[in-house]
Amino acid sequence: MTQALTPSRSTQNVRRHVLDNGIVILVTENPAADIIATRLFLGTGTRWEPPGKSGLSHLLATVLTKGTERLTSLDIAERVESVGARLSADTSADYFLMGLKTVSSDFAEILDLAAQLLRSPSFPEAEIELERRITIQGIRSQREQPFSLAFEGLRRAMYGDHPYAISTYGTEETVSQLTRDDLQQFHQTYFRPDNLIISLAGRITLTEAIAHIDRVFGDWPAPAEPPPEPVLPDVSPDPHKAICPLATQQSVIMLGYLAGSVRHPDYAGLKLMNTYLGNGLSSRLFVELREKRGLAYDVSAFYPTRLDASQFVVYMGTAPQNTAIAIEGLRAEVVRLADVPLSEEELQVSKNKLLGQYALGKQTNTQLAQIYGWYEILGLGIDFDRQFQADVMAVTAAEVQAIAQKNFVEPYLSLVGPEAIVSQF
């Protein structure tokens, strides 16, 4: 008999406070080590980029740490490295992030630096040009990688004009046309205190965190009008193929299905199915298609957490001559979820695996600061931590089958491989 895990209650250690200017502070006290990890989330990202400006938030992230009104990029690097701290900026589809990690004695100094970077970046033209070239090199590199090409084809097929259709890098065309004015306008629009979540974990109390954050951010006024929401096109199913010939030694196959957002009632069930199908060496796809049939170089599944419609994807890398049978095998394993209910053993093993890995993802201060800040910026709140675990435990085999029947009807197909093979599809 497989023993069931129980949801953890770690959120009882998280405390929340809102400053007068709207900044939300989350603190997870963990005095075991003399480290403070901080994640500063902003409610922006590629989802908020204006039409024709794809890659704007990524370019902003790369140059945000390269200068302020008073500091050069070298000054910034020396301040961080002189105390052995870490500081970085990044973007995603649904949020923008700055990350800090310091020993507690250096926290005030590095937080002050982060505040300067967030509030008054100078966006030096030379740094913009350098990062633009690096980004374009990254885009070109992606076009040489079969997996990246297949995923790009799938995204574009599934999302059309929605920002989710494009990599966070943007496109070579859009990135080459971005200007310093674009960066400044985007920054002025979305970098504001009432759009900021600061999540901390480590040797710090809520009272100490409030004092530090109020000192460097408390005089930052929030504009009278709320930040604008993006105007996004509807995403509706229209399954079709994206075929990309490439001189390569393998075929990369992706089947994609539009699936619910993080707020959808099916979310926990879809995460459970993703674990069952594609998570690890004991997953259904790995065992059936790689171990038993020898079809796959690589095989897995993923279901990203998204504010808007997400995608449930199964994929495989295989020998070109096996392309047709591999597509059939992938499709059969997905359809099986709709046709055959999971056994109680399969269901419980998947729950234990999902919740066990979820718990392991909350072991370090960095992980704790990340997950609670992430839930807060997505509008879910820190209680989503416990709610998600409870939802997973409550999923039944009948619900899994019903969700599969509703979502896994006709897939999008993205295929990359030798022209002689993929042209047949």
Image (cartoon, grey):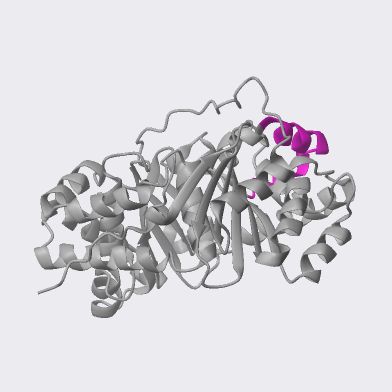
Q: Is residue 281 left or right of 158 when viewed as pictured? A: left
Q: Is residue 6 left or right of 46 when viewed as pictured? A: left
Kindly tell me whether residue 245 is visible in this rendering: no
Dominant secondary structure, magenta: helix
Please say whether residue 123 is one of the residues in the magenta stretch.
Answer: no
Q: Is residue 383 above or below residue 320?
A: above
Residue drawn at the location 31% of the way across and 54% of the way down = 271
Q: Position of residue 187 (x, y in %)?
A: 72, 36
Kindly tell me whether residue 386 is visible in this rendering: yes
When asked about the image quadrant of residue 266, the answer is top left
* Extreme residue in the top direction: 224
Q: Position of residue 162 (x, y in %)?
A: 51, 35
Residue nearer the viewer, 336 or 127: 127
Q: Is residue 269 above or below residue 174?
A: below
Q: Position of residue 184 (x, y in %)?
A: 78, 35
Residue drawn at the location 24% of the way across and 56% of the way down = 334
Q: Is residue 173 left or right of 179 when viewed as pictured? A: left
Residue nearer the viewer, 352 or 403: 352
Q: Is residue 165 above or below residue 370?
A: above
Residue nearer the viewer, 381 or 335: 381
Q: Position of residue 127 (x, y in %)?
A: 84, 52
Q: Is residue 269 left or right of 52 when viewed as pictured? A: left
Residue nearer the viewer, 142 or 100: 100
Residue drawn at the location 27% of the way across and 79% of the way down = 291
Q: How many marks?
A: 0
Q: Which residues are magenta?
A: 169-189
For the N terminus, the image quarter is bottom left
